[in-house]
Image (spheres, grey):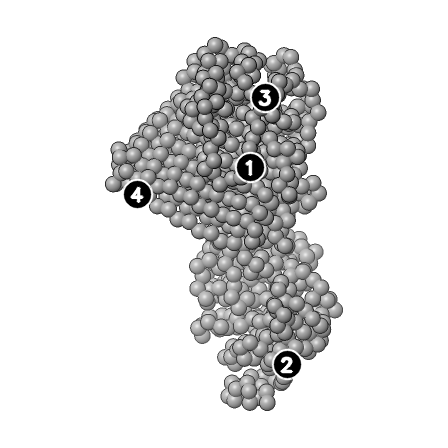
Amino acid sequence: MLKIEGLTAEIDGKQILKGIDLEVPTGEIHAIMGPNGSGKSTLSYVLSGREGYEITGGSATYNGLDLLAMEPEERAGSGVFLAFQYPVELPGVGNANFLRTAVNAVRKHRGEPEVDAMQFLKLARAKIKALQMSDDMLKRNVNVGFSGGEKKRNEVLQMALLEPTLAILDETDSGLDIDALKIVADGVNAMRGPNFSSLVITHYQRLLDYIVPDRVHVLMGGRIVKSGGPELALELEAEGYAKVAA
Amino acid sequence: MAAVAETLETVQAANDGGYKWGFETDIAMEFAPKGLNEDIVRFISAKKNEPEWLLEWRLKAYAMWLKMEEPEWAAVKYPKIDYQDAYYYAAPSNKTVPKSLDEVDPELLRTYEKLGIPVQEQQRLQGIAVDMVFDSVSVATTFKDRLAKEGIIFCSISEAVQNHPELVKQYLGSVVPQGDNYFACLNSAVFTDGSFVFIPKGVRCPMELSTYFRINAKSTGQFERTLIIAEAGSHVSYLEGCTAPMRDENQMHAAVVELVAMDDATIKYSTVQNWYPGDAEGKGGIYNFVTKRGACRGARSKISWTQVETGSAITWKYPSCMLLGDDSVGEFYSVAITNNHQQADTGTKMWHVGKNTRSTIVSKGISAGQGQNTYRGLVKVSPKATGARNFTQCDSLLIGDQCGAHTVPYIENRCATAKVEHEATTSRIAEDQLFYCRSRGLTQEEAVGLIVNGFCREVLKELPMEFAVEAQKLLAISLEGSVG
């Protein structure tokens, strides 16, 4: 279970998160919706350990572990995965090499044996097939020359391979056409189960047609101002943030 | 993945000891008196029992050197060198020349073993013949007999002067003349040892040839001279490695390497340069002033330089190709790293003379700490070099905000049908790249290793297998502590 209590954080002296309280029980998918500048991305970066954010108060634990005290790679090893809003390019680094390095880093952390090149290839090909992607993904350099949709698919492929128990999706739907959106949603839905939880951060209700959340939270001005069931997303779409939050 | 695991291991090893080649060998040494004058030149020549013509050749170089000025055009800063305050000859004081490995001082062999150099011929799996140069002299060469069966000569240049004087006389200085430049001229006067390779017509050298240079003695300059001749249709791959103890003072290394490739011959010359770079404050380290040049004399000949420059306080080095034969090919692949206070001014010269000559230049400069890295290159196309082609790519990677990367390409094209291309990029290891890798479970060091190796991939793939692994490790170690 992810448990966030009174979390406050600032960047360059400017307070962005002003006291977040949130619980995501294991096995549930929660959506966080909010207008631009409400602190959605900051929340995802703070949870995954990006530098540059100062935690000024509160706590965030995952299965009892103090997330905020851990290095980003330790969080990844503990099952936390962040799907980036803007996936990063790594020139000269082959995607297969990168993915296998990541898989083995995480396996090592879990005390599992590393996979060799052949085992990995078999594993990766199976996942790629299930996600209806092309084998070509493995041969190219990490995200270099990928279209927006391909980058997001690569994030979903990484998630499928790393098998996290908590996936944070930071506006994974932005810039996706409807077909790509479905592929991404299928990837997340395929992981759904009693041991998987997810925090789906999004602007629009559209993604939630495909990934139906257990709970929806509205983030505005650095606070969760309202929570509800999946119907809250529809309400937001129809009436706008200002009215719903008022 | 293997590379990343290796990188991680080595980084851990590096954490324990920093520059792990920094030890000193305690061995009885014989020195020439400190300083430089005509008598020292005579002393070196006499020590090596050289023929009169070679002494004359040295003295002529010395006379020229006295009239020359130290070049100042390179983008490197260092205090004025006092050429009288160094030893120009230092050799282990073993009276007799060892005839086989068994006779070599075990302390010396231990030094090379400690450096990870395969000195025992039993280690056949390594498949590398090694010439070991310790300060001013070659102490041992492995696999000589086996190579001799193919007609290949691989020995120290001192031995070549004794046993194959006609070849040395014919080729010495034929690619880099005595008066070529200040440091090459100094080398011509006082060079002490180095390797000599001769590959006869049509022979493909069955193993990698390698020379391992070690500066051990204090206040000593190393001036080695290497000469490689590949006759028509022959092929050779040659590797060079270098290390030195950690010292507070700066030591000088001024080498000259000459390559000659005849018709259809190929010479592949790879260097992993890891001289002591000085400490984090910039104290100590080797001044590396090296002249390397290859002449593609024959038609369809090929000379390929690959270098990974991680060490030295100062690197001044431009391995070049004179493309004289028609359809000859020159290549230069380089990775240069400067961390802490290291400075590198390195690049190449491709001189197109023959018709349809082709050259490729791929330079990757990595600057970290307060390091300064300059690519300096010249592509020169003569009027007769019709159909000549050059492609140049210079990429710089910056780590941190105190370092510098500079690219200084010169192009002189006097031929209307020649095609010259130049591409350059500068980038930095971005915080988001590191975070991206770490959020996937990689540690900071693994992430840097992965990104830097990706950046250098085009060059590293040119290295022979054994060296590629060593080079990847070195990249990680050299950048140790540069991020975070």
SS category of the residue bearing label 3: loop
Residue count near mark 3 (Cα–Cα under 10 Å), binned few <14, some 14–19, many ≥20: some
Amino acid type of the residue that numbered disc 3 sits on in the rendered structure: Gly
- Of discs 4 and 1, which sits in the foreground? 1
Q: Are marks 2 and 3 on the same chain?
A: no
Q: Are marks 4 and 1 on the same chain?
A: yes
- Of discs 1 and 2, which sits in the foreground? 1
Q: Are marks 1 and 2 on the same chain?
A: no
Q: CA distance from mark 3 to mark 4?
A: 49 Å
SS category of the residue bearing label 4: strand
Task: Give the letter of the chain under mark 3.
Answer: B
Q: Which mark is residue A224?
A: 2
Residue count near mark 2 (Cα–Cα under 10 Å), binned few <14, some 14–19, many ≥20: many
Q: Which residue is mark 4?
A: B419
SS category of the residue bearing label 1: loop
The picture places residue B478, in percent across and down from the top left corner, at 60, 43
Task: Give the letter of the chain under mark 1.
Answer: B
Judge by depth and name the residue closer to the eye, B349 or B465: B349
Mark 3 or mark 1: name the one nearer the start of the chain. 3
Q: Which mark is residue B35?
A: 3
Mark 3 or mark 4: name the one nearer the start of the chain. 3
Judge by depth and name the residue closer to the eye, A97 or B313: B313
Q: CA distance from mark 2 to mark 3?
A: 78 Å
Q: Which mark is residue B78?
A: 1
For image coordinates 55% across by 37% down, the residue present is B78
Residues at badges 3 and 1 in contact (C-beta under 8 Å)?
no
Q: CA distance from mark 1 to mark 2?
A: 60 Å
Task: Give the letter of the chain under mark 2.
Answer: A
Q: Which mark is residue B114?
A: none
